[in-house]
Image (tube, rainbow, N blue to C red):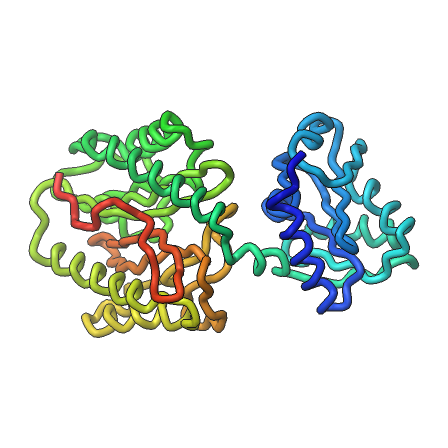
Amino acid sequence: MDDGEFAPRRRLLAERMAELGLDAMLVSALPNIRYLSGFTGSNGLLLIYGGEAVLATDPRYATQVRQETACRVVVKRGAMVRAIGPVIRKLGLRAVGFEASRMDVATFHALSKEVASHAALKPAAGLVERIRAVKSPEEVERIRRAVRLCSAAFNDVVRRVRPGIRELELAAELDYRMRKRGAEGPAFETIVASGARSALPHARTSPKPIGRRELLLIDVGAQLNGYSSDMTRMLHLGRPAAETRRLYRVVLEAQRAALDSVRAGVVASQVDRSARRVLQAQGLGPRFAHSTGHGLGLEIHEPPRLGRRETARLEAGMVVTVEPGAYIEGFGGIRIEDTVLVTSKGCEILTPTSKELMVV
């Protein structure tokens, strides 16, 4: 089994662990396990120590785990902590980090019993996620392919938009087209929200028929080879009113201002501030109810977050969304979102789909 892209990641994690005085790190979040080992199963625990790694899973994955990872493997029925606990005791590991923001309470208590009087459990939340935030060229290419696949599926479906089609039908067609083009599935639950419902930033797609002269917000992403994409585009059925066009122009200006501020070294909050300043000047500041963007990769939401109070600095190789919006209850909402790659000089917009208001 080729361990080429995973061993360097584990070595980097081991360096970060040493800085925190940790002998070992117990990884429980499945995306982090995949990132560090290649294992894609739904049950496992990964112990990293001294440059070595032990991966525990259950018998359902006995064949799969050996196909996917070069780590030492322990296959055991029952709770995974019962497989990892004896390893911790046998190796004499004393300070063991765990993913405090990811591990459930029941698992933590079971782990505590397994290593009681042998090891101290130290919270190390976000340690792996901070490493994941900067993507390798191979990861960027996987995200780029997911972005292009999503955009192609979107283009397939746009021509089917017509008055009377239900939001659920359109969402199902998008999901189908992404899978038909090779996606593992949607990166998140596809959002199709029309009319006044588009003012709900995270609307749940409904059986509502899409009406004439209505705004239509579509937020969609594909998952391909484990990596996610994310974009939002706006359509209008019939000729939009002058106020709708004005609002769209303001949100587009805010998005462009945010994009112009993305580059390595910039504090994440500055990107948010750039978008918010434009909206505020046009009286839409209170209508922007969420952060300007987020990182994405193996998960649809990853560090860094592009929010008001974020102090992290962007680094070349990070992949983030830029998605300001304005939401007016009873009228509708407008959001424009691209997936972008942070570079030393700015950003590369990965999303190829036009950002013009599409009139259908």
Who's the residue at 71% across and 58% down the image?
Answer: 14
| Residue 122: quarter of image | bottom right
Residue 327 location (% of width, % of height): 27, 58
- Dividing the image into 4 quarters, which one contains the C terminus? top left
Residue 115 location (% of width, % of height): 87, 53
From the viewer's perspective, is residue 87 above or below residue 16?
above
From the viewer's perspective, is residue 307 above or below residue 83?
below
Who's the residue at 46% across and 65% down the image?
Answer: 315
For the question of whether residue 197 can be seen, the reply is: no
- Dividing the image into 4 quarters, which one contains the N terminus? top right
281 with respect to 104 (left or right): left
Who's the residue at 75% across and 53% down the image?
Answer: 51
- Of residues 353 and 247, which is closer to you in this image? 353
Residue 142 location (% of width, % of height): 45, 42
For the question of whether residue 21 can be seen, the reply is: yes
216 with respect to 299 (left or right): left
From the viewer's perspective, is residue 126 above or below residue 149?
below
From the viewer's perspective, is residue 54 above or below residue 68?
below
Who's the residue at 9% across and 41% down the image?
Answer: 238
| Residue 148: quarter of image | top left
297 with respect to 99 (left or right): left
- Of residues 131 and 289, which is closer to you in this image? 131
Residue 278 location (% of width, % of height): 23, 70
How many numbered dots are placed on residues in this image? Answer: 0
- Of residues 132 and 234, which is closer to you in this image? 132
